[in-house]
Amino acid sequence: MALHSEGPVYAVSPNRLWVADITYVATWAGFAYVAFVIDVFSRTIVGWNVAATLKADVLPLQALNMAAFNTRGSLDDLVHHADHSSNYLSVVYTDRIAELGARPSTGTVGDSYDNALAEAVNGLYKTELIRRRGPWRTVEQVELATLEYVWWWNNARLHGEIGYRSPAEVEATHYAEVESARPALAGQETK
């Protein structure tokens, strides 16, 4: 796994490196804040949340909890990378990362390249959804549209960085390869 600004960020399997960031969407009712957690291996959005507040225990923590809930297996080898915002450095957030068995990581102050993938996801989200379908009336409207967008991103959108495949396809291929590499137990037939 690599994590630095001099080259690409990658992971050798799922749940090794997650990146996280927050963006915002203007609505007629005030700002909607959006937090994403992305698995670098497949570019899957593993957790997300939309809220009317930036409070750490509401916005990013719920995205992290969603990611943890949807995970296959242990997170003991996971590095969770985010920027230096107060949300990601808060006690409630860093304690939750520790509870999950993951290691927190932050980049250098003011260097968006350290969290380039998360920043790119935010930019694509705003380009592909927010600007196309706005203006937005409510936070709830943004939340529903984000739910649909995340499904599309993970299951249908083709990503050039992963061979013009969807994140779901990349993960399915990975787990199929892991399964086929396991030796068959006595009495089991291989297909």
Image (cartoon, rainbow, N blue to C red):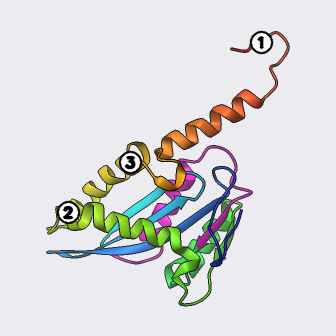
**Foreground residue, 115 or 164?**
164
Q: Disc 2 versus disc 3: distance between alpha carbons?
A: 16 Å
Instruction: Give the foreground label among 2 and 1.
Output: 2
**Foreground residue, 102 or 173?**
173
- Magenta stretch in the rendered image: 53-81
Is there CB contact under 8 Å for labels 2 and 1? no
**N-terminal label among 2 and 3:** 2
> What residue occupies the far right of the structure in this picture?
186
Q: Disc 3 versus disc 1: distance between alpha carbons?
A: 37 Å
Q: Disc 2 versus disc 1: distance between alpha carbons?
A: 52 Å
Is there CB contact under 8 Å for labels 2 and 3? no
Kindly identify the residue that appears in the image at 43 percent across and 60 percent down: 48
Q: Amino acid at mark 3?
A: Arg
Residue 58 seen in render: no
Q: Residues within 10 Å of mark 1 (few under 14, many from 20)?
A: few
Q: Amino acid at mark 1?
A: Gln
Answer left or right for 19 relative to 11.
left
Q: Which residue is mark 1?
A: 188
Q: Which residue is mark 2?
A: 132
Q: Position of residue 114 (x, y in %)?
A: 59, 78
Q: Which residue is mark 3?
A: 157
Instruction: Determine the secondary structure under disc 2.
Output: helix
Instruction: Determine the secondary structure under disc 3.
Output: loop
